[in-house]
Amino acid sequence: MEVSLFRFSARQLQTIHADHLGFIIASSHCCNELICVMPYIIFEQDIEEANEVERALINIRFFTIVRHQIAKIFEYRELCNDYVSAIRKTFPSLAESVREETKLISRRIGAAKWAQVVRNKVAFHFDDQYAAEILKQTPPDQELIFIVGKHRGQTAFDFADRIIVESMFVDAGNGDRELGLNVVKEWTIELQRQIEGSHARVVSQIFSQYGIFRNKELSEIRDAWCALPGQVAIPLSTRGGSIV
């Protein structure tokens, strides 16, 4: 797969106006985190063919990634708000453009009360009082499981994830668990795409202005490192002793 490679020096990067510089680096880092976990979703094991234990491991991994994405979306909004404040007087036109895009992100976040709970109670903090409270909402006859394997990655406290994740789905779907599952997935993916697009527009504008795009060369990601969905699957566990 062909890619473009741009080379520049730290000195060139340092010539960018100070009001832009911190945002460009921090925003790029945030997008790296959002983008780098996508292969774990795209190349995930086929849950339809999995048995009960395999499904549990796949679901734990998948929704750990989703919670990570939700937390980063909140942090990106705060980063953009600070950036708009910093460039409001020095670069008013760009500030207004970023502010309008940030408004869309904020509006979606504001409408997703369930996401705020996940961010504050689960993704960033291990809130024991919240965990105990949502257990009370779990039907008494709900089956829970605890998995123990011989290798690292095979032990899973599925009961804990099931309680927390089910609460997230039910809240997102206003009581409808299946609807909530789709709401969570769509909300996370759409906002990630919006953030990536917004970041790309700002960086392209500033990098073009400061000549960062001048030294372009072609490179590639070879087949050994790049595959289409369905060709590769992320392993469920790795060699090593179990914690139990």
Image (cartoon, rainbow, N blue to C red):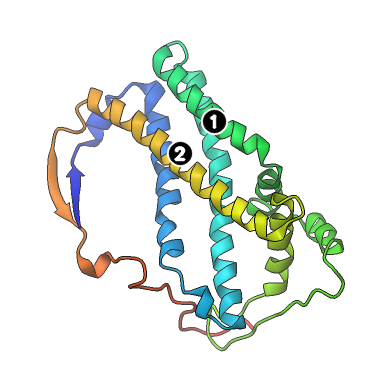
Judge from the rendering whether residue 234 lies leftward or rightward of residue 152; answer left or right: left
Identified at 45% across, 10% down, the residue is 89
Question: Residue 230: horizontal and vertical position, in percent?
Answer: 36, 71
Most extreme residue toward the top is: 89
Give the labeled residue for mark 1.
Answer: 104
Quarter of the image for the C terminus: give it.
bottom right
Q: Amino acid at mark 1?
A: Leu
Place of residue 114 in the rendered image (x, y in percent of width and height, measured from the top left): 70, 47
Q: Is residue 217 left or right of residue 15?
A: left
Residue at far bottom of view:
150
Q: Are marks 1 and 2 in contact (CB under 8 Å)?
A: yes
Q: Residue at x 82, y 56 (%)?
A: 129
Between residue 64 and residue 211, name the one nearer to us: 64
Toward which corner of the image does residue 108 lie, by quadrant?
top right
Q: CA distance from mark 1 to mark 2?
A: 9 Å
Q: Please name the amino acid that badge 2 sits on.
A: Gln
Of pointers 1 and 2, the one earlier in the residue sequence: 1
Name the residue at 55% across, 67% down.
61
Q: How many numbered callouts? A: 2
- Residue 113, percent from left and from top: 71, 42
Looking at the picture, tell me which residue is in the foreground, 108 or 69. Answer: 108
What residue appears at the point 40 percent right and 19 percent down from the top-left corner?
Answer: 94
Q: Nearer the viewer, residue 219 or 50?
A: 50
Vertical placement of residue 179 versus 211, above or below:
below
Left-right relation of 49 to 121? left
Q: Is residue 243 left or right of residue 212?
A: right
Q: Position of residue 180 (x, y in %)?
A: 67, 54
As helix, strand or loop, the secondary structure at mark 1 comes to helix
Crowding around mark 1 (Cα neighbors within 10 Å: few <14, some 14 to 19, many 20+) is some
Q: Which residue is mark 2?
A: 194
